[in-house]
């Protein structure tokens, strides 16, 4: 049994409100993509408010989820129907102003991250680049050492997303 799970936080600024026809394709995909995540191998948990993963605040939406491994999240993100939505992200979102819109980090299994922690990790990634505390698919870090809890000193070799 894994001692650590992978936390995932993603934030984006909407081009238009969720009830605008310009975001209709995104909104239509919310329930099917959430259901796909929920049944994906390695899925642990996602923040769900009112049945959806996203809650707009000042036209910024965010997703927060937990996965058993980097490989499980990568498979869901890039090897499932979710990829179609990733490819269309520019249709629905504009840059936030951060260097990144997605951040990953390891958490002890059985704990849950908070949205504020996601924002803090995203800012850390933007300020310091990938570290064991905040990284990306392109610059991943392995889970902390299962015995000591110590974070590894360097990233894993990058794999194409």
Image: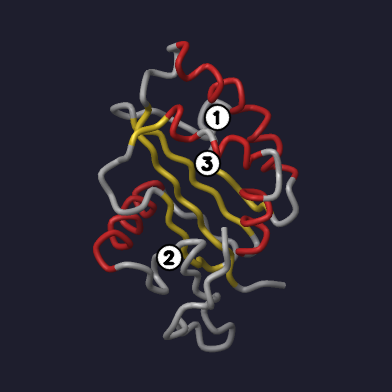
Q: Compute the Cα span from label 1 to label 2.
A: 25 Å
Q: Image quadrant for the N terminus? A: bottom right
Identify the element where label 1 is drawn: loop
The Cα–Cα distance between marks 3 and 1, rounded to whole angstroms, is: 8 Å
Q: Mark 1: few, some, or many residues within 10 Å (few <14, many ≥20)?
A: some
Q: Position of residue 91 (x, y in %)?
A: 46, 28
Q: Residues within 10 Å of mark 3 (few under 14, many from 20)?
A: some
Vertical order, 152 against 141 (above or below): below
- Point 54% across, 84% down: residue: 145
The mark lying in front, picked from 3 and 2, is 2
Which residue bears the numbered disc 3? 47
Q: Quadrant of residue 71?
A: bottom right
Q: Is residue 74 left or right of residue 96?
A: right
Q: Where is residue 97 drawn, in percent x and y?
A: 25, 44
For image coordinates 39% across by 46% down, the residue present is 115
Of the pair 1 and 36, the residue shown nearer to us = 36
Circles 1 and 2 in contact, beta carbons < 8 Å: no
Q: Residue, x 73% and y 48% (percent of image)?
A: 40
Residue under label 1 = 52
Quarter of the image with the C terminus is: bottom right
Helix, strand or loop status at disc 2: loop
The residue that disc 2 covers is: 135
Q: What's the distance in space between the residues labelled 3 and 2, CA to CA?
A: 20 Å
Q: Earlier in the sequence, mark 1 or mark 2?
A: 1
Q: Is residue 28 left or right of residue 116?
A: right
- Residue found at x 45% / y 50%: 9
Q: Quadrant of residue 122?
A: bottom left
Determine the secondary structure under disc 3. loop
């Amino acid at each position: 049994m894994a001692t650590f799970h992978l936390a995932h936080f993603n934030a984006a600024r909407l081009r238009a409100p969720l009830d605008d026809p310009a975001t209709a394709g995104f909104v239509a995909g919310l329930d099917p993509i959430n259901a796909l995540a929920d049944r994906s191998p390695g899925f642990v948990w996602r923040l769900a408010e009112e049945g959806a993963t996203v809650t707009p605040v000042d036209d910024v939406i965010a997703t927060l989820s937990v996965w058993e491994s980097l490989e499980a999240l990568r498979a869901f993100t890039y090897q499932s129907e979710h990829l179609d939505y990733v490819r269309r992200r520019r249709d629905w979102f504009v840059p936030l102003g951060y260097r990144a819109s997605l951040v990953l980090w390891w958490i002890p299994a059985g704990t849950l991250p908070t949205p504020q922690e996601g924002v803090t990790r995203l800012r850390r990634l933007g300020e310091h680049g990938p570290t064991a505390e905040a990284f990306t698919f392109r610059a991943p870090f392995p889970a902390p050492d299962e015995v000591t809890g110590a974070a590894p000193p360097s990233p894993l070799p990058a794999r194409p997303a």
